[in-house]
Amino acid sequence: MLQGKHILLGITGGIAAYKICTLIRDFKKAGADVQIIATPNALNFVTKLTLQNLSQNEVFVEEFNVKDWKPEHISLSDWADIMLIAPASANTIGKIAQGIADNLLTSVACAFSKKIILAPAMNVNMWNNEAVQQNLKILQMRGVEYLPPESGFLACGYTGKGRLCSLDKIYNAVDEALNYSQMYKGKKVVITAGGTIEEIDPVRYISNYSSGKMGLALAKTANDMGAEVVFITTKDFDVPFKKVLVKSALDMQNAVNEEFDSADYIIMAAAVADYRVKERSEQKIKKGEQNTITLELVKNPDILSELCKRKTSASLEGELSEGQRAGIIVGFCAESENLMENAKAKIEKKGCDYLIANDISRSDIGFNSDENEVTILDNNGAIKKISKAPKNVIARKILECINTK
Ligand code: PMT
C-alpha cells in the first residue's frame, strides 16, 4: 500500500529513536521511499550510518549543507507526501507549535503544507507539563495529528505515560493518511457555514453566534480528502476551493439549490435564521419618541427540509436525469437542552440521511469555539458519539462516518 509513497521521517533526540530503525525497514519493505532528517541530538541515540543504510538514502542533519539551488528545507518538503516525526521530543513539539525554525527538521516542518504526524515520546513529567500539552493542542488545531504515547516503564526509570506508541500504530496512521484519506476523490461536497444575516435596515441585522469554524473545518478536511468542495458561507474565509459568499437564508438557499443536482454530499453546518424581517427598510430606522418598536418577522424556508423533500421525490419518481446525483444530505442540530431527544425528532422531521447534534449551551464547544463534541445520528436510528476534540478532528470523523464510498 505504500508503494511509491514519499515519507519524510524526522527523528529527534530521545531513546525511542532506536525503535524507529524497525519502522524504516517496514516502510521500505512496503515500497515507500524514505528520506530522513535527524536532529543533531537524535544522532546521540542512533547513528547516521544506520539510518542511511536502512533508508538507502542520504540522511540530512545540517540546515546549510546546500548542494542544490533549492535549499533542503524546501526541496524535502516539496518531495514528501507526508511528514512523520518519531520520536517527537518536547523540545521539537514546542518549536513547531511556536513556528520556530532553528534547525533543518523544524525548518522543514515550518515549510510543510501537507500532513504531519507526530509520535511523541518523553519522560512522564515532561508529557504532563502544561506547556507540552498546550503546544500539542495548538498543533492539533492546525491539523497536525499526534499519536499519544503509551504508559509503561520509561527509559528514564520512571513509570507512566511517555513511551513511544507501538510501531504498528505509527505505521497504520501513516498508511491511513496516505491511502485512506483520499476517500472523497471524484466526489463533490457542498458545505454551508456561518450564521445567516437577515438585514433589518442598512445598519442592523438579525444573526446568531455561528463563527463558521465548524463548516470551515469540514470544507478544508473534505478538500484534503480529495473532494471537489463548494463552500457556501456567510464568513469570508480565504480558502483554496470554490467559495460562494452569501448573506441571508434566501441567498444561501439559492446557492445550495444551484449545486444540488451535481452534489454527492450536502452538509448544512450553517446556522440558518428561521425568521427574517418581513420588510427590510431601505433607510436607517430612526429612533423615535416611542419606547418600543415591533419588527414583523416572516418564516424563512427550511433549506435542509426542502432539499430532503426534493431528493426523496426525485428518487421516488425516478426523476434523476443522467448525471444527476441523489446526494447524501447531512444536517446539523444545535440544541441548548434535551439534545438527543430533539435531535431524534429533528432527523425524522427534516428527513436527512445524517444529523450531527451539538450542544450549544456549553461555552467550550459548539458556537464560536475551536473544539466541538458531537453525536452523529443516521436515518436508521444508529447513533455514534464523538468526544470533544478540535473541530478539524471532529470534521474528519464526521466525513469518515458519512462516507458511502
Ligand atoms: O459556526 P461555529 O461557530 O463553528 O458553530 C458550529 C455550529 C454550532 C453553528 C454548527 O455545528 C451547527 O450546529 N449548525 C447548525 C445550526 C442550526 O441552525 O441548527 P438548527 O437545529 O436550527 O437547524 C437544523 C438544521 O437545519 C441545520 O443543518 C441548519 O443548517 C438547517 N436549517 C435550519 C433552519 C432553516 N431555515 N434552514 C435550514 O436549512
Image (cartoon, rainbow, N blue to C red):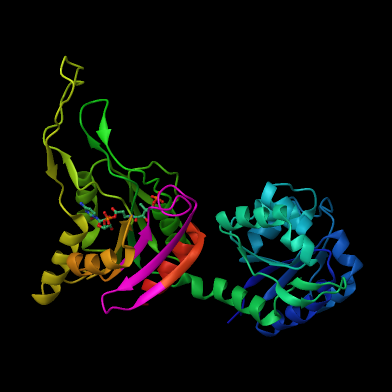
Q: Residue 23 is drawn in which quadrant?
A: bottom right
Name the one closer to the observer, 99 or 362: 362
Q: Is residue 359 magenta?
A: yes
From this viewpoint, which residue is outermost toward the bottom?
29
Q: Residue 14 is drawn in which quadrant?
A: bottom right
Is residue 405 placed above or below 208 in the rendered structure?
A: below
Q: Quadrant location of the N terminus?
A: bottom right
Write down the region rendered in magenta.
Answer: 355-384
The answer to whether residue 27 is left or right of residue 125 is: left
Q: Position of residue 318 (x, y in %)?
A: 11, 76
Q: Position of residue 51 (x, y in %)?
A: 83, 73
- Residue drawn at x 48%, y 67% is 387
Q: Position of residue 391 (x, y in %)?
A: 48, 57
- Residue drawn at x 70%, y 85% is 29
Is residue 287 placed above or below 275 in the rendered structure?
A: above
From this viewpoint, which residue is outermost toward the top?
289
The number of numbered badges drawn on the structure is 0
Q: Is residue 90 magenta?
A: no
Query: Is any part of residue 70 visible from this angle?
Result: no
Name the one closer to the observer, 266 or 66: 266
Name the one closer to the observer, 231 or 307: 307
Q: Quadrant location of the C terminus?
A: bottom left
The answer to whether residue 221 is left or right of residue 382 is: right
From this viewpoint, which residue is outermost toward the left?
317
Query: Is any part of residue 84 visible from this angle?
Result: yes
Q: Position of residue 254 (x, y in %)?
A: 19, 49
Looking at the image, in which quadrant does ligand 1 appear?
A: bottom left
Q: Residue 21 is drawn in which quadrant?
A: bottom right
